[in-house]
Amino acid sequence: MSFDWRQAALLDAWLAPSWREAAVEYAKQPYPPRGPTSAQDKCVAASTVEALVYGLREGIEKISEGERMRRLSELSDVQILEVCERLQSFNPDIAPPWTVQQVKSLVGIWRRVHA
């Protein structure tokens, strides 16, 4: 009987620490992979959020200019909360932080245009 080098190589590969670590990490992931389950769960790209926040430094009065309204309409529930938090946390040296009333107005607009 001859030694089966192929089986030995496969066995060594399965027992290698790097493979074991990768397998453990993979096993921690939920199965099946969970994707967005509804329109509200879908998120736009981070660059869209960044562009919106950047554009809103000029205030709520500028919401209808450029692509701001489209970007706002595409935000998920989670993303609109993130945007509101960031608007209220503006560095006053760069742009005035938004007031609660301005944020409420933005959320009202988002509710009307949200796809």
Image (cartoon, rainbow, N blue to C red):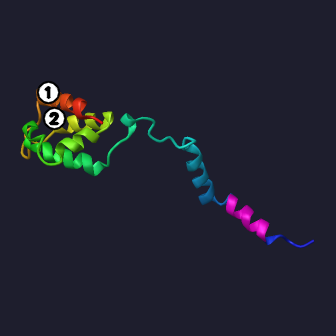
Label 2: few (<14), some or many (≥20) within 10 Å?
A: some
Position of residue 36 measured from the top left corner of the image (x, y, whole percent): 44, 39
Q: Are marks 1 and 2 in contact (CB under 8 Å)?
A: yes
Check disc 1 and report the residue beneath it: 100
Label 1: few (<14), some or many (≥20) within 10 Å?
A: few
| The quarter of the displayed image where residue 78 is located | top left
* Magenta span includes 9: yes
17 or 90, nearer to the observer? 90
Report the amino acid beneath label 2: Gln
31 or 2, nearer to the observer? 31
Question: Magenta region: which residues?
Answer: 6-14
- Predominant secondary structure, magenta span: helix
Secondary structure under badge 2?
helix
| The quarter of the displayed image where residue 30 is located | top right
Secondary structure under badge 1?
helix
Position of residue 74 measured from the top left corner of the image (x, y, whole percent): 28, 41
Residue sticking out furthest to the right: 1
Report the amino acid beneath label 1: Val
Question: Which residue is at 63% across, 54% downward?
Answer: 20
Left or right: 87 as drawn, with respect to 15: left
Image label count: 2
Question: Which residue is at 9% across, 41% downward?
Answer: 62
Position of residue 77 measured from the top left corner of the image (x, y, whole percent): 31, 33
Residue 18 position (above or below residue 27): below
Position of residue 85 measured from the top left corner of the image (x, y, whole percent): 22, 35
Residue 6 position (above or below residue 115): below
